[in-house]
Amino acid sequence: MTTSITYSSTRGCPTQTNITFRDAVMTGLAHDRGLFVPDSFPSVSKEELASWKGLSYADLAVEVIGKFVKDDQVPRKDLERIVTTSCASFRTEEVTPVVKVGDHYILELFHGPTFAFKDVALQMLGNFFEYFLETGSNGGRLAILGATSGDTGSAAIYGLRGKKGVDCVILFPEGRVSEIQERQMTTVLDDNIHCVAVEGTFDDCQDLVKGSFGDVGFRDRVKLGAVNSINWCRVLAQTTYYFWSWLRVAEGMDDVISYSVPTGNFGDILAGYYSKIMGLPVGKLIVATNENDILHRFFTKGEYHRENIHKTISPSMDICVSSNFERYLFHLAGNDAKVLAAWMADFEKTGKLTIAGDKLKTAQKDFLSARADTAMTLDTIRQYKQKYDYMLCPHSAVGVSAIEQLGMTNLKTVCLATAHEAKFPNACKMAVPELPTPPEQLSRLWGLKTKKTLCENDLKKVQLIVENKIQERIRNQQSPQDSQKKNIVIEVIRGIAVLAFISSTLITMSKNR
C-alpha cells in the first residue's frame, strides 16, 4: 500500500520530523514555532491532469488531496465523505466557478457559507477535525485558538460550530474588521463558539496565538489546535481550485496560466506555488497587496522588513507579517531548516530579513507583485461596475489592479475573487453609491443577537478566557443526570472524609488513654 506524505517543521524540530497528516493537522503549529511542510511532493502528469477534466469539484478535490493523503491516514471512502460533505455547504455545485470578465478570468471563491474564499478550506478542516477526534485523536477533545483579520474567523466558526469535542476561540482586532465580518462571527451563539475582541491589530492577535502554542503547559492542558493558515490542511485544501480553474481556462495541455492573488498571510498564493511544484502548468503567481506591502517589497527589492500596519478598506490584507510566508522561505533556503531557523530568529529580533542575488532571482522567477492603494482599489471597483456590470470586493479589486499594472490583462490570467462585495458595503459605496441588493444571508445579520468578549492585548488574559470558556461550555452541556451523579460523588467523598476524620479522632483518643 502506498503511504501518505509526511511532514516536518520548517525550523527542524527534532521531535517533529516525518510526522503523519493526522498529527500535522491536529497539532497545527510545530513545537519550535515552525510550520509543517511536506517532506516530498507528489507529481501530477499531463495524462493524469487531462483525465481530471470532466470531474466535479468534489471528485477533483478527492484526487488532489488523495495525492497526499492515502488509506493509512484516511481511508478513501472516508476522504470522499469528508470532501463531499464539505462541498455540499456551498451555494453552487461548481463550488468555485470561473467566469470571464472583460479580457481575463475571475475565479469566484465566495460561494460558501460566509461568502469568502476561506470557506473552501475551513469547511474541510472542520470535517477533518471531527473525523480525527472520532477516530482516537486527543482523547476526543480539541481547543481551537485562531486569529482573524476578518474572514478566517467567521469561516472557522461556520466550519466548527456544533462539532463534538471542539471549542473554538477566535481573536479579532477590535474596530479593525468590517461590521458584517464582525456580525458573521458574533451572531453564532453555539456553546462551543467564543469570539474575543482584542485591543490591538491582527498581528497582535496572531502573536497571541503563536505565544499560546509556545506555552507548553497551556497547549497540552487545553489540547490546543489551529485553524489559521499555519495549519497545513488549509493550504492543501486550497490547491484544488488552482487545478479546477486551470482545467476550465487552458485550451491545451501545454497552456501556461498565471494567477493574481490578493495576498495577506500568503496561504492562498502558496497553494498555487505548491500546485506548480506538483506539475500544474502555472506561469507567474502575482502577489497583490494593499498599502501593507511587505510582500511587494520583498519580491521587488528582497526586503522583508516589518512596518506599522495601515488601516485600509481591504482589512483582511492589513497584515505586516505573513505567517505562511515562512513555508516559502523554507523552500527558498533550499529546504534547509537550519538556514530558515536562523533567518526567522534574526527577523524576530530585528524585524528585517533581506535577500539578494540568486535567491532574489529565484523568487522573482515564480512570483511577480504589485501594490494597489485605496484610490487605485476604488477606481478598479468603479471601472468594473461601469464597464462589465461586475462588482468586486476591495480585496479582489487589488488583485485585478495588479494585473492591469503589470500588463497581464489577458485570457491566460486568472484573478482570484476572495470575498463577496456585500461584506464590505461601506468601502464599495465609495466607488459605487448604489450597491446591488445584498444576499439575504448577510442582510439578516443585523437583526440577530450577538456575543463577544473584550480583552486586552495580554497573553495570560487571553489564555484565561480560553480556559474559562471551555469550562463554562462543559458545565452548560452537563445533563441533569450528569449533575446528579456529580452531586452523589461529591456527597460520597464528603461522607468518606467525615468517617475518616471520626476514625482518626477515635484512634487518637484511644492512644491518649
Image (spheres, rainbow, N blue to C red):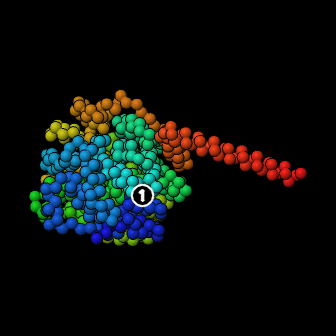
Q: Classify 468 as above or below 295.
A: above
- The number of discs equals 1
**Camera sees residue 113:** yes
Q: In which quarter of the image is the N terminus?
A: bottom left
Image coords of residue 153 (percent x, y): 38, 44
Eyeballing the image, is 367 above or below 311?
A: below
Q: Going 19% across and 38% down the picture, which residue do you hit? A: 385
Q: Residue furthest top?
A: 447
Q: Which amino acid lies under the numbered mark 1 shown in the image of this protein?
A: Gly
Q: Name the residue under label 1.
A: 136
Residue 502: horizontal and vertical position, in percent? 76, 46
Q: For the point 55% across and 39% down, which residue is it?
A: 484
Position in image of residue 241 (x %, y %): 23, 54
Q: Residue furthest right?
A: 513
At label 1, counting other C-alpha atoms closer than 10 Å, the crowd grade (few under 14, some 14-19, many 20 or more) is: few
Observer-nearest of 69 and 491: 491
Residue 285 appears anywhere in the view = no
Q: Is residue 261 above or below residue 374?
A: below
Image location (x, y in percent) of residue 216: 53, 58
- In the depicted view, which residue is nearer to us: 324 or 486? 486
- When asked about the image quadrant of residue 311, the answer is top left
Local SS, label 1: loop
In this image, 34 relative to 2: left or right? right
**Residue shown at the point (39%, 57%) measured from the top left:** 135
Q: Which residue is drawn at 26% across and 39% down?
A: 421
